[in-house]
């Protein structure tokens, strides 16, 4: 039985990955921060909380990471923990850097010293590209030009992972994942904000949905598909970095239209209000990933379409809020 350690196991990707690995027969360890009220709702969504070995730790604390890795003795480590909300990174730039940048170095050092044969996955992000592209698309060779404290911190984590691979002959790799969503996405992210807002409007709980830039385009996929790509990267003979994406992008407007349509609401524009509070200081306008390498070398490809993803998110929020219906 293989052993896997997942940081960020209570997040969207952590929950989907834990479920996937348990189905593969793994023994799963999850790193969690000590809080008075642990947030296990995503793991409860799959009914898997009791099948996971939880270890207390924090990417800010070296000793706790050393202890977690030495205790778990993992074959695979998936570093998914992060301060992952771009908007917050401008307000908490130093904390974002400590967690997303130096935190990666801390966990890499723990793996190096206490589980040197373990394979290591780092969650990189398409936000590292900024508005940089090659012929309108982004792949593993596209120059990186991050446009937020979040993206800059993630760029450090990406490069330190490469550095440990090249310097210490460790099996470390990064997945440059483009936007991936699900019903388990946090409410502060625009996709879940839309699906939740549409459900509230449908049930008569709210009368408007306040958003920022409707013209921004993203390459949106399904988290459940993307965690399988993470696993596939660690099953290879040699560590490499891969872009994971659908190869199709849509605007926030497209997401709104699809979400309102899924709820059976016409004339969606009358419900949407543009709020300057949600406009980024440095806007990222366009992301479109090319995952040819992953499709050829990993045999991976996305399964859920954009329309299926939006419909799933809206229907889940409609069900969740149904008891509030007026």
Image (cartoon, rainbow, N blue to C red):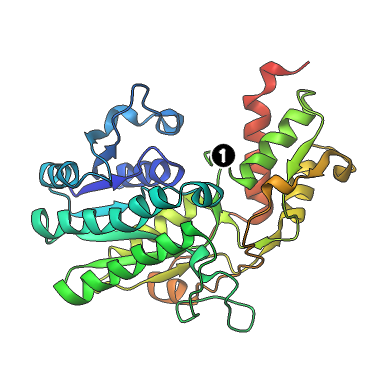
- Residue found 21% across the figure and 67% down from its top: 171
Place of residue 209 in the rendered image (x, y in percent of width and height, measured from the top left): 76, 38
- Residue found 36% across the figure and 71% down from its top: 241
- Residue found 41% across the figure and 61% down from its top: 154
Q: Is residue 197 left or right of residue 86?
A: right
As rendered, which of 111 and 238 lies closer to the eye?
Answer: 111
- Residue found 30% across the figure and 45% down from its top: 7
Q: Would you place residue 33 above or below residue 3 in this image? A: above
Q: Would you place residue 142 above or below residue 46 in this image? A: below
As rendered, which of 247 and 10 lies closer to the eye?
Answer: 10
The C terminus sits in image quarter: top right
Q: Residues within 10 Å of mark 1 (few under 14, many from 20)?
A: many
Q: Is residue 74 left or right of residue 149?
A: left
Q: Is residue 101 left or right of residue 4?
A: right
Q: Would you place residue 246 above or below residue 187 in this image? A: below
Q: Is residue 141 left or right of residue 115?
A: right
- Residue 249: quarter of image: bottom right
Place of residue 181 in the rendered image (x, y in percent of width and height, measured from the top left): 56, 49
Look at the numbered disc 1 and give the secondary structure of its residue: loop
- Residue 157: quarter of image: bottom left
Circle 1 residue: 183
């Amino acid at each position: 039985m293989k052993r896997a350690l997942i940081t960020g196991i209570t997040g969207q990707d952590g929950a989907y990955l834990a479920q996937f690995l348990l189905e593969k027969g793994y023994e799963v360890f999850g790193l969690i921060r000590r809080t008075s009220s642990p947030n296990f709702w995503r793991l409860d969504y799959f009914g898997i909380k009791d099948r996971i070995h939880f270890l207390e730790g924090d990417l800010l604390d070296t000793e706790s990471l050393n202890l977690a890795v030495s205790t778990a003795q993992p074959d695979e480590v998936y570093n998914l923990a992060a301060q992952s909300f771009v908007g917050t990174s401008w307000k908490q730039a130093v904390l974002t850097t400590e967690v997303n940048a130096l935190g990666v170095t801390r966990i890499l050092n723990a793996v190096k010293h206490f589980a040197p044969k373990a394979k290591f996955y780092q969650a990189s992000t398409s936000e590292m590209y900024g508005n940089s592209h090659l012929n309108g698309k982004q792949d593993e060779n596209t120059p990186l030009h991050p446009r937020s404290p979040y993206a800059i911190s993630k760029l450090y984590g990406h490069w330190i992972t490469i550095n440990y691979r090249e310097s210490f002959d460790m099996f470390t790799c990064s997945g440059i994942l483009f936007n991936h969503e699900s019903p388990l996405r946090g409410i502060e992210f625009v996709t879940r904000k839309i699906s939740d807002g549409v459900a509230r409007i449908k049930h008569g709980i709210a009368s408007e949905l306040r958003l920022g830039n409707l013209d921004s385009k993203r390459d949106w996929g399904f988290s459940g598909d993307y965690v399988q790509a993470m696993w596939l990267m660690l099953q290879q003979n040699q560590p490499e970095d891969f872009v994971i994406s659908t190869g199709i992008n849509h605007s926030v407007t497209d997401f709104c239209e699809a979400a309102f349509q899924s709820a059976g609401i016409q004339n969606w524009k009358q419900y949407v209000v543009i709020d300057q509070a949600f406009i980024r200081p440095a806007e990222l306008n366009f992301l479109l990933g090319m995952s040819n390498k992953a499709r050829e070398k990993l045999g991976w490809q996305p399964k859920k379409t954009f329309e299926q993803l939006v419909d799933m998110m809206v229907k889940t929020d409609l069900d969740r809020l149904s008891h509030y219906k007026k």
